Amino acid sequence: MDYEIKRLEELELQRQNEGIELIASENYPSVSVREAQGSIFTAKYAEGYPGRRYYGGCVVVDELENLAIERCKKLFNVAFANVQPHSGSQANFAAYRALLQPNGKVLSLTLNDGGHLTHGSGVSFSANTYNFCFYPLGEDAHLDYNIIREKLFEEKPDLLLAGYSAYPYAIDFKRMRELVDEYNKATGSNCRFMVDMAHIAGQVAAGKCQNPCDYADVVTSTTHKTLRGPRGGLILTNDPELAKKINSAVFPYSQGGPLEHVIAAKATVFAEDDTPEFKAYFDRVLENTKACNDELARLGCMVSGTENHLFLLNVLGSFGVNGLEAQTRLEEVGITTNKNMLHGDTLSPKYTSGIRVGFAAATSRGCTKQDAEEIAHIIYETLSNPNVDVEAMKARSKKIASKWTDISKLEY
Ligand code: DSN
């Protein structure tokens, strides 16, 4: 045993167990998922795809990867799945490659309104390989489908991109498909529609929102957020031609040997998520997120409202502190969140006017509606009072977290 690593693992487990995790992109995989990820499959090289590998000895990993693919297709009701992307960014890299020529034009949400770095940020490969243009949110911070329609006709993109990192409302994928079809018909273009569902993949799997696979040409996702799986990515499509291009874009274009141990863990979570228990879990995620949002609103705070696993709290408007300061003060009392830009934010991404709050992880441990309301009070009291008794607040957080399941023992 490597005692130095074990010591750090134990410290991290203690940190996770004692704290209240409200980062909207985090979650806790089950013991079964972690066991699969720690399995001997890590020792196997398997470049290629099942039945078409560049190494011998792949008979078992072929069965494993096919099982993951079949479970994934069933979960999302889709014809093709590539389960090899190492991350969401790698999945987006390969999806763009399959859908676009270099310099192809992508219409994406304004990044400050809740997009992701791979959705056109100058610091990522995306904006350096493709030509991004943007649609803003409407004045009420909701998607405005008329603006998207106008931008489609004005910018003439090759790809419309939807799916966001900090958008608390439902997304009408059907409407976006109709807009792309209308634009293509009117102009004779072949604009495609892609959805990065990384944040809401669990909600999709639970059948609690529109399934983007019914409307988009390509859907990408991570597997570790609301899906509750291992860190990783995936790509889905119903189009056989695009499926071939996606496979080539993942391997050999952008990745080498697939992480078959991670694919084993993905297969495990696809089965866990395809159950009535997961649907019930997601009902509780939605209930807890709303309960915390509504309690903060009742206390007079400026919150976004929510139709998924997250909401945005305007900490500058509510308490006169910026997002970075709010994040730091909440961490001191045992609550982990992250600073986040708000629609029309006047502060820089380093500071921001808001924080993003999500309940997927806390709910996995057993957070109740009553807990979510009590958490709202801890957030309110911590941020509204610069002289708050930090130790007393921390003890309140710890008391809530101590009722929940030990993260190292979670089975769903
Ligand atoms: N970093 C993720 C998030 O926090 O939303 C996006 O990949």
Image: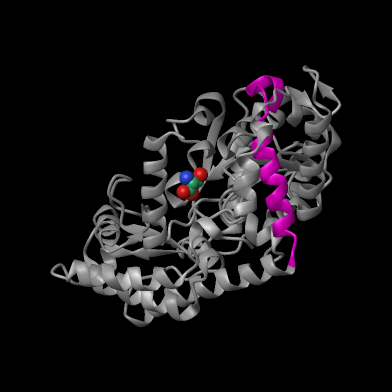
> Magenta segment range?
250-275
Nearer-the-camera pick, 79 or 43: 43
Main structural element of the magenta stretch: helix, strand or loop? helix
Q: Quadrant of residue 349?
A: top left
Q: Nearer the viewer, residue 117 or 25?
A: 25
Q: From the viewer's perspective, tell me whether residue 371 is left or right of residue 171.
A: left
The image shows residue 412 at horizontal and vertical percentages of: 64, 63
- Give residue 264's position: percent from left, percent from top: 70, 41
Give the image location of residue 279, x and y in percent. 68, 68
Seen at 22% across and 72% down, the residue is 392
> Residue 139 lies in what quarter of the image?
bottom left
What's the colour scheme? one colour
Q: Nearer the viewer, residue 167 or 207?
A: 207
Q: Please give left or right for residue 407 compared with residue 16 in the image.
A: right
Q: Would residue 107 appear left or right of 294 to someone viewing this image?
A: right
Tell me residue 227's x, y (percent). Answer: 62, 54
User: Does 319 appear above or below 272?
Assistant: below
Residue 393 makes an appearance in the image: yes
Q: Is residue 254 magenta?
A: yes
